[in-house]
Amino acid sequence: MTGFGVEGQGWDEMLVGQKWETAASVAASFVEGLVANMPKTPVVVNINVPNTDLADIKGWKSARLGHEPPRRMSTATLEPKVGHEGGYYVRMAWGEAAELPQDTDGGMVADGYVAVSYLSSIVNSERDDLSAAEASMSKLITR
């Protein structure tokens, strides 16, 4: 969403001006085509839409998922929650906007394109470098 991650901004303020109808139109169009010709295997689709009017979208592209955040966090502090012993708010300050790679979903959306990514399955992978974390869990759960 436009404005996400701006320090001091509340959710209500962040939702003002969002072009939900554009995203809804894009999603409805994709789903219409999908159900008209279902794929052979299940698919998870990640669609990112610029916050603009449909007429202003430049097109759509297939995108790789970006791992880069749109802004870098500059500081994070814990602020005690009044009336919640041991509870804290995490207050973060964000730096300048980062330039996102053009082949990523975020980069394409920033450039005015709808970004479409087909997500593959998430699979477990064996690791041999997490024995300390596994031992810690074994201590906690002693069945």
Image (spheres, rainbow, N blue to C red):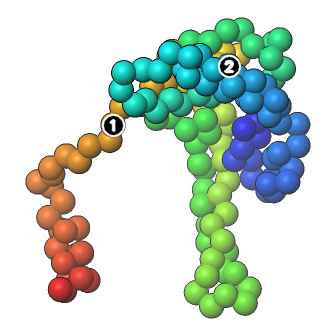
Mark found first going from the N terminus, 1 or 2 = 2
* Residue extending furthest toward the left: 128
Which quarter of the image is occupied by the N terminus?
Answer: top right
The residue drawn where x is 18% and y is 60% is 130
- Compared across the picture, whether 9 is left or right of 62 comes to right
Residue beneath disc 2: 29
The local secondary structure at tag 1 comes to: loop
Identify the amino acid type marked 2: Ser
Tell me where residue 70 appears, x and y as whole percent.
61, 35
Nearest the viewer among 3 and 7 is 3
User: Does residue 32 sit above or below 16 in this rendering?
Assistant: above
The residue drawn where x is 82% and y is 29% is 21
**Number of numbered labels in the structure image:** 2
Are dots 1 and 2 in contact, CB under 8 Å?
A: no
Residue 16 falls in image quadrant: top right
User: Does residue 79 sit above or below 103 in this rendering?
Assistant: below
Per the rendering, the mark at residue 121 is 1
Q: CA distance from mark 1 to mark 2?
A: 24 Å
- Compared across the picture, whether 80 is left or right of 103 comes to right
Residue 102 is at least partly visible in this image: no
Tell me where residue 7 appears, x and y as whole percent.
75, 52
The residue drawn where x is 74% and y is 86% is 82
